[in-house]
Amino acid sequence: MLKIYGWKRSRAARCMWVMEELGLSYEQVPLNPHAGETRTPEYLALNPSGKIPTLVHDGFVLTESAAINWYIASSFPGTLLPRDGRLAAKVQQWTSWAMTELEPALVSILHERRRSKEQVDPARIEASQAQIHQVIATVLERRLAASQYLLDGQDFTLADLNAASVTSVLQAFEMPLDKHPAVADWMGRCFARAAWARVQQRS
């Protein structure tokens, strides 16, 4: 039995997306960290950091969304994880890129926006936005201008899922992608998938 802790307004969504793509049966426990639901003794026994997501599979406990997604995609048959070693390494490459090059600037904007109105620094937000656009233009846009998906000769894979789950924050921030048309088209393809729609129906 697969059980995922976390609500869809968190990185838990990318883990649910993997399970939906693979047609797996799972239980979701939609914890709200803002309501203290990740600080209970029961949950801290699973994840001492008090963060989400956490996966429990037949007594095996795993945290960190990238690790969870790799575990699920490699444990259950499907098309998300290529069998070729080099292509699988590319999945890791794009996942690491999204989470180390792109996600930190997005998180910095999120933290800035959570400040009280008088404490928000527009200059910090603008600097992070400029960094995001530069990273997208120099890496992601170039790649997707040459291919519909991130891996050569492959359809939608875990690389796309992980990277798209990070870029989804751009939509929440209403950041325009008119300068990145290939990225905009790719995001449209990724988020039009039925599995993603099913995630959005959850809590």
Image (cartoon, rainbow, N blue to C red):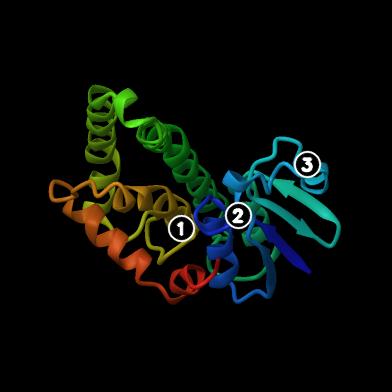
Q: From mark 3 to mark 2, how far is it between C-alphas?
A: 21 Å
SS assignment at label 3: helix
Of the numbered discs 1 and 3, the one sitting upstream in the chain is 3
Q: Is residue 115 above or below residue 181?
A: above
Of the numbered discs 3 and 2, the one sitting upstream in the chain is 3
Q: Residues within 10 Å of mark 3 (few under 14, many from 20)?
A: some
Residue visible at 50% across and 52% down? 87
Residue visible at 44% across and 44% down? 94
Is residue 74 rendered to the left or right of residue 147? right
Q: Amino acid at mark 2?
A: Asn
Residue beneath disc 2 = 69
SS assignment at label 1: helix
> Which quadrant would residue 103 be assigned to in this image?
top left
Q: Amino acid at mark 1?
A: Leu
The image's mark for residue 44 is 3
Residue 139 on image: x %, y %: 29, 39
SS assignment at label 2: helix
Q: From mark 1 to mark 3, how far is it between C-alphas?
A: 28 Å
Of the numbered discs 2 and 1, the one sitting upstream in the chain is 2
> Which quadrant would residue 26 be assigned to in this image?
bottom right
Is residue 201 rendered to the left or right of residue 54? left
Residue visible at 37% across and 56% down? 152
